[in-house]
């Protein structure tokens, strides 16, 4: 039984496949995925993080793209772009596919170790509703 990629505790039958080269090069400790929210927004050295740069890119270039954050990009392209960022390609070119960058943002947010919105804020929002 293996992990199905939707819910962390769900399992399904796993198929044995070989991983593409770019996945094998991904560092064990990711610079992008699975970081606490404060580190996800700013790198340790004070430079903008992946999430900050990706959100700025989407604000500038993705706003005019139909279906942004709704239409899914190819999962392998998203993984490849995250891996490229970790290997040093840290800037987004104006011609990059905004759907890929948007799905990278969604992936990073899903993999945060804790909720980006504190429980106390959720309670206040629910009470206000």
Image (cartoon, rainbow, N blue to C red):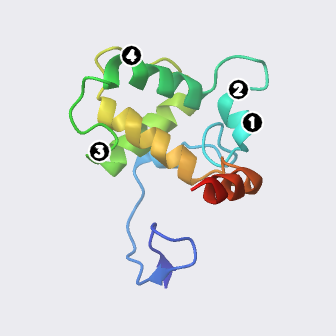
In space, the residues marked 3 and 1 are separated at their CA atoms by: 26 Å
In space, the residues marked 3 and 2 are separated at their CA atoms by: 25 Å
Quarter of the image for the C terminus: give it.
Answer: bottom right
Q: Total of numbered circles in the picture?
A: 4
Q: Nearer the viewer, mark 4 or mark 2?
A: 4
Helix or strand or loop: what does disc 2 sit on? loop
Can residue 113 be seen in this snapshot? no
Q: Residues within 10 Å of mark 3 (few under 14, many from 20)?
A: some
> Which comes sooner in the sequence, label 1 or label 4?
1
Q: Residues within 10 Å of mark 2 (few under 14, many from 20)?
A: some
Is label 3 in contact with label 1 (beta carbons under 8 Å)? no
Answer with the quarter of the image where residue 37 lies: top right
> Which comes sooner in the sequence, label 3 or label 1?
1
Q: Please tell me the numbered disc located at residue 73.
A: 3
> Which comes sooner in the sequence, label 4 or label 3?
4
Is label 4 in contact with label 2 (beta carbons under 8 Å)? no
Q: Residues within 10 Å of mark 1 (few under 14, many from 20)?
A: few
In space, the residues marked 4 and 2 are separated at their CA atoms by: 19 Å
Residue beneath label 4, please?
Answer: 60
Residue positioned 63% across, 26% down in the render: 49
Q: Residues within 10 Å of mark 4 (few under 14, many from 20)?
A: few
Q: Please tell me the numbered disc located at residue 42.
A: 2
> Which comes sooner in the sequence, label 3 or label 2?
2
- Measuring from the top left, give residue 9's x and y in whole percent: 57, 78
Is label 2 in contact with label 1 (beta carbons under 8 Å)? yes
Helix or strand or loop: what does disc 3 sit on? loop
Residue beneath label 1, please?
Answer: 38
Residue positioned 70% across, 46% down in the render: 29
């Amino acid at each position: 039984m293996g992990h199905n990629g939707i819910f962390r505790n769900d399992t399904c039958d796993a198929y044995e496949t070989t991983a593409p080269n770019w996945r094998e090069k991904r560092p064990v400790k990711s610079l992008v995925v699975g970081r606490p929210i404060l580190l996800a927004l700013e790198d340790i050295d004070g430079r903008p993080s992946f999430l900050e740069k990706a959100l700025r890119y989407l604000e500038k270039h993705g706003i005019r793209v139909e279906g942004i954050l709704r239409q899914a990009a190819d999962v392998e392209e998203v993984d490849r772009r995250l891996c490229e960022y970790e290997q040093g390609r840290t800037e987004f070119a104006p011609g990059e596919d905004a759907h890929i960058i948007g799905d990278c943002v969604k992936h990073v947010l899903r993999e945060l170790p804790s909720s980006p919105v504190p429980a106390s804020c959720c309670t206040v929002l629910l009470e206000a509703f």
